[in-house]
Image: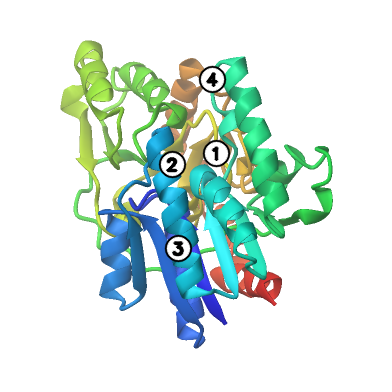
Amino acid sequence: MKILYGITKSNFGGAQRYIFDLAMETSKQGHNVTVLCGKGGKLVEKLREEKIKVITLKDLERDISLIKEIKSFIEIVKILKKEKPDIFHINSSKMGGLGGLAGRLMGIKTIIFTAHGWAFNEPRPTWQKMLIKFFTWLTILLSHKTICVSEKTKKDVESWLFIKERLVVIYNGISRFNLDIREDKSFTVGAISELHRIKGLDILLMAWSKFIKKHQAKLVIIGEGEERRNLENMAIKLGISDSLIFKGFVNNARSQLSNFDIFCMPSRSEAMPYALLEAGLAGLAVIATPVGGIPEIIESGTNGILVPTDDPETLFSTLVLLTENVDLRKRLGTNLKASIQENFSFEKMAEETLQIYL
């Protein structure tokens, strides 16, 4: 098959990891694979290193610009006309809408849209949420099938008109990976995340400001994003900068999970986060919030602990609990690792996705 994957941004967040892994697997199986995305990010570099064809769109960006959207749409139409893919697998809101419409106009046989979460679940004004819901509905209508990465993702939209039969749940999956040898023996709490408001890292910093008064430890945050400066300033105001390290973007960040004792994901919105799956596969005790598909991974008290969103007090007390109870920490990590291996394998995800292509 000739497969064209499309995504808006070319950084290397969870959706980009999904594209990269699928592109690698389908290419390995002998399919003709191309990836279409915004210009200049880590995804482009990694795909080209693996000799996978990449087409970049200079005007395709996350921010809204009517002129740039029109230019991008025209470019996508031209690319579809030239490439003539059997499968056009689109990801992210903007590529989903523009790509779905372009694909229908060009008569693409199979258009697949993967929903890595819904923007209308993020904290936004009501009018924005309603507008986003309308365009989300259109994107699903334009696609032949929509992959939801969690049952919660599907439930959020399945009652909408004309789309229920187009929805299918396929969990994100990961393969085993190598962990670095632990370099620092000091007690470490960690997070791997894009630095955006919906990730709730401000809540983690507030909890940390209380935690660090009781325990000697450090907090390591791996990732980049628009909130970095705000978070750094917040850390200074809270007086916790000496116990906090912002490492920025780290290539193959999951290999550094061996340096963590506890993994935190205090998000306000998620779908099926790769970082959480990776932390589980590394055998870490996880503290997370019950948003999106996270409760489909974590059964609180059995293989992790779920705390309410925007609740630094409960996050603080849970950090204290896991820090002081080594046996609980180990048990949660062991149980989560076993669950990830059984239910969230990359092989299963790839097989189920390829079945939709046929």
Residue 124, numbered label: 4
Spatial separation of the CA atoms under disc 3 and disc 4: 34 Å
Task: Check contact, mark 1 vs mark 2: CB within 8 A.
Answer: no
Front disc: 4 or 1: 4
Residues 64 and 163: in front is 64
Q: Earlier in the sequence, mark 2 or mark 3?
A: 2
Q: Is residue 140 left or right of residue 262?
A: right
Secondary-structure class at tag 3:
helix
Give the mark toward the camera: 2 or 3: 3
Residue at (29, 22) in percent of width and height: 212
How far across and how far down the image is residue 70, in percent? 44, 43
Q: Residues within 10 Å of mark 3 (few under 14, many from 20)?
A: some
Q: Measured along the vertical axis of the image, is residue 274 above or below residue 197? A: below
Q: Is residue 59 above or below residue 67?
A: below
Q: Residue at x 44, y 65 (%)?
A: 79
Q: Which mark is residue 270?
A: 1
Q: Is residue 305 left or right of residue 38?
A: right
Tell me the crowding category of disc 4: few under 14, some 14 to 19, or many 20 or more residues within 10 angstroms, Cα based.
few
Residue 69, numbered circle: 2
Report x, y in % for residue 21.
Answer: 45, 68
Separation (CA) of disc 2 from disc 4: 22 Å
Rendering quarter of residue 136? top right
Q: Position of residue 355 (x, y in %)?
A: 69, 74
Number of the label disc, if any, that sits on residue 78: 3
Indicate which disc, 1 or 3, sits on the residue closer to the N terminus: 3
**SS for dot 4:** loop
Name the residue nearer the viewer: 205 or 113: 113
Labels 1, 3: front one: 3
